[in-house]
Amino acid sequence: MRFEEIVFMDDCFRSPDNLVASHPANRRFLRRTFGLPARRLGIPCRDICARSEGGTLDVPTMMRTLGLSQSPAGWARSCVADLAPLVDAGLVPRLGAGTLVIGWGLTPSLMHWLDRQGTSFIDVEISPRRFASHLAFCVRTNDRRIQTALSDWEIDDETYWNEATALKGYFARRGASNLFGADLRIGLFCGQTVIDLALVQEGEIARPADVSEAVKALAERVDLLVVKPHPYEPDQRHLRALSARIPNVAWSEANIYSLLCADNLEFVCSLSSGALLEASYFAKESIPLIEADRNNRAVLPASCSEWMTVGPGIASIECMASLCADSPNSAPKASSYPGDALDRAFRARWGLDAQNPGLPDLPALEASRDHTFRDQSLPPGWLTLGWHDPAPAGAAAKGPFATIVIPLRPGSWPVDTAPLVEINGKPYRDGKFDFRLSAHLNDRRNPRAVVLEFDFAQGKPGFWLQHLRVAPARQSPRAGRRATASSAALTVVTAIVCALGVMKLVSTNTDPIQASSDWTQIQKVVASRVDAMRDDIHVLLQHHI
C-alpha cells in the first residue's frame, strides 16, 4: 500500500477552548466509515484532535503561540494563520508522505500545514446539493492520483438537474406556485448559522449587517426581500440587524425547496449559503455576497483540487483500495455500497423530506375585516415566522420573534396611507410580559403587502394571537403618540390594555379557554408612517402587565 497510516481529523481550533461549538461526531463518522475498509487493507488508523475531545492537541497553548485570542474571532484568524510556529514548537505532529489525512471541514491553514509536509489529504463534507434523492459527499484533495481515483466516483451534474425537475413537480402538487402572491416580485436572503467556516472571509467572521448596503440595493429590484433563517440557528439577532435596514423586508420559515420552486422568486442572495449553489438548478439567479476563505484559490494551497461531488461509495473497499494503491488502478469494480448510507447516518435532509408542505395559498387582505384565530378564519399562511399552528385558543408565539405578512390586492390600498393594525390576544406567561409590535408597508407608492413584526422581551414568547384587523389609517386618533428616536420613527396610534381579571397562571400549559377568568386581555392598535425606514423598529409599543 502507498500509505503507512490514515489519520482522521477535523478543525481542531473549532473547540470549546475558543468558545465555539465543536462537532466531534463528524470526525468519528469519518473514522468509523473509512476506518473499516482501511483495516481490511491492513492500514492502521488514528485520530488527531484537541485535548477537549480526548486528543493530544493543546489548543490554548497553540492559540497563545500564534498570538490569537481564545474567542470566535481568534478561531476565525486560525483558519488562515501560518501554523509553522506550531510545528517549530512541537505543538502539532510532523507527518509525511506515508500518511493520508482524511479530514472533515479542513481549514486553509490546516491544508497548508499538511501540504508543506508532503502529506496527502482528502477534505470531506456533505455536498451542499441536498435536494436529491440521496445525500452525497463533496471532496477535494492535494494528491493528483487520489483526485483521479475519486473522479471515477463523481456524480454527473445532469443528475442534479433531473432531481430539481422532479422536485418542482413534487411541490407543484403540494401548494401554491408563488410566494405571497403571483403579482409580487420576491427576492430571498438565506441565513446561515452564526459560526460557520463558510462565513470566514479574510480571517474574520462575516455578518449579514456587513453587506447591508448590497442587500438593500438588491431589495430595490423586488417588492419584498424575504429573509429565510437557517433552521438550525435559533439566534436571529444577526439577521435582524440586517432586516432593520431593509424597508421592504419580510420573513419566512417555509421549506427552502418550496421557496426555490416559487415562480415569482427572482433571485437568491446570501453571504455564502449552500442554497446559492442549489438555486442555480432551479433556474434562479444566485448572488453570493462574500468570498469565503475556504473557497478562495488565493488562500488555498496551489495543489488543492476543486470540489468534486461523489457518492457514499468512496468508503467502499474498492475505492479505498484505489486511493491507497501503490500504482494507479483501472476503473473500479461495481460497488453495491448503499446509496442511502449518508441519509441513514445523518438522519436529516436539511430541508427536504416527504412530509414537507408546499407554499400556502395566501388570500389578499379584506380591509377592516376582523380575522379571528379562534375559529381559524385568519389564513394560517399569513403567519410566516415564529408561530404555532392556530388552535381554539388562538395562534401561540413560539420564539422571541414572530412575523405576519399580509398580501394586498393591486390598487386596493391608498397611496401614502399608513396601515392601521388592531390585534387582540391573551398572554400565557406568568408575571411581567412585554412585547413590541411594528407594522409597515413594503412600498408607500405601490403598497403590495403589510408586514407585522412581534418582538418578545427577553426572548420569552407568551402570547396567544386571537384577532387581527388591518385597514388604511384615515386619521390619527387622539390617543396617538409618536416615537421620538428619529424622524422616520413608527407612530403608535393607541394602546389599550383592558383588565378582565388578575393573571395568576401556575403553568404555561393552562388552557386559556378553561381559565379565561384568570387571564388579562390585550388589545393594541398600531399604525406606521408609510415612509418609515425601520431603523428604529424596536423603539415601539411596550406595555407591562
Image (tube, helix red, strand yellow):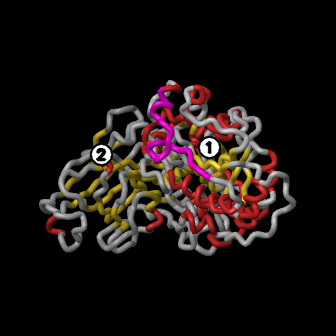
Q: Magenta span has 351? A: no
Image: 289 above or below 264: above
Q: Quadrant of residue 143?
A: top right
Which residue is identified by label 1? 106
Which residues are the magenta region? 45-64
The amino acid type found where label 1 is placed reads Leu
The amino acid type found where label 2 is placed reads Leu
Which residue shows up at 36% across the image and 61% down it? Answer: 469
Image: 453 above or below 464: above
Q: Quadrant of residue 378?
A: bottom left
Which residue shows up at 78% across the image and 50% down it? Answer: 147
Which of 31 and 285 lies nearest the eye of the viewer?
31
Q: Is residue 330 left or right of residue 216?
A: right
Q: Is residue 521 left or right of residue 385?
A: left
Q: Position of residue 464 (x, y in %)?
A: 30, 63
Image: 375 above or below 260: below
Foreground tag (2 vs 1): 1
Count of picture labels: 2
Q: Position of residue 118 (x, y in %)?
A: 73, 37
Please tell me whether mark 1 sits on a helix, a strand or a loop.
Answer: loop
Task: Point out the tag, 2 or 1, that comes first from the N-terminus.
Answer: 1
The Cα–Cα distance between marks 2 and 1, rounded to whole angstroms, is: 47 Å
Examine the rendering and report whether any part of residue 249 can be seen.
yes
Disc assigned to residue 541? 2
Disc assigned to residue 364? none
